[in-house]
Image (spheres, grey):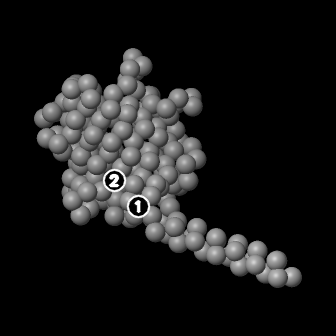
């Protein structure tokens, strides 16, 4: 009897802890963000300084992340619009707007860090860690992306809240 009471209390505490953790996911990421060309870099040295034009809209509620971005960097092409709606549980969710990747996996890491994995056919194309800096005024994402040619580069991109 004591053993089953102990197990019941342990299970209740574990459920409440998981619930608090899900509810405490940082909603401070919520907002509209535009890239900061001056601070951003790519490891291959080819960051399109002054040309990159990327705007992201992020909404977080509980353990749920909704993402929308418009990349209007290439003036001779239509903007690339990426959308996804994912629970931050590390499971795959559909992503639309890219021919390079079609699935996203999102999970919260310790503190105010979020991992974003963009994949196609179980192949990791982009892996990124998002974090907030400057008291929540700056979103920084650091990651590694694979080009369509199959080569990879690291990047550190900064976004300012609008």
Residue 120 visible? The answer is: yes
Rendered residue at 39%/55% (across/down)? 113
For image coordinates 33% across by 28% down, the residue present is 153
Q: Which mark is residue 53?
A: none
Left or right placement of residue 15 versus residue 104 in this view: right
Q: Which residue is mark 1?
A: 111
Q: What residue did someone put label 2 on?
A: 131
Question: Which numbered disc flags the more N-terminal residue, 1 or 2?
Answer: 1
Which residue is located at x 45 percent, y 58 percent? Answer: 110
The answer to the question of whether label 1 and label 2 lie on touching residues, with beta carbons closer than 8 A, is yes
What percent of the width, then of the height, locates residue 97? Answer: 42, 36
Q: CA distance from mark 1 to mark 2?
A: 9 Å
* 158 w.r.t. 50: above or below: below
Nearer to us in this view, 67 or 22: 22
State the image coordinates of residue 57 (x, y, percent, origin top left).
33, 52
Q: Nearer the viewer, residue 81 or 23?
A: 23
* Vertical side of 21 occupied by 162: above or below: above
């Amino acid at each position: 009897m004591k053993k089953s009471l102990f197990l019941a209390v342990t299970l209740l505490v574990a459920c409440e802890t998981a619930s608090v953790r899900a509810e405490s996911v940082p909603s401070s990421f919520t907002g509209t963000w535009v890239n900061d060309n001056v601070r951003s870099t790519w490891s291959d040295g080819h960051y399109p300084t002054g040309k990159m034009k990327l705007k992201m809209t992020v909404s977080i509620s509980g353990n749920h992340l909704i993402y929308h971005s418009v990349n209007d960097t290439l003036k001779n092409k239509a903007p690339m619009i990426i959308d996804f709606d994912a629970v931050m549980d590390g499971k795959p969710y559909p992503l639309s707007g890219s021919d390079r990747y079609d699935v996203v996996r999102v999970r919260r890491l310790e503190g105010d860090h979020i991992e974003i994995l963009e994949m196609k056919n179980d192949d990791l194309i982009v892996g990124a860690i998002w974090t907030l800096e400057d008291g929540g005024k700056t979103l920084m994402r650091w990651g590694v992306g694979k080009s369509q040619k199959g080569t990879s580069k690291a990047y550190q991109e900064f976004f300012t809240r609008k």
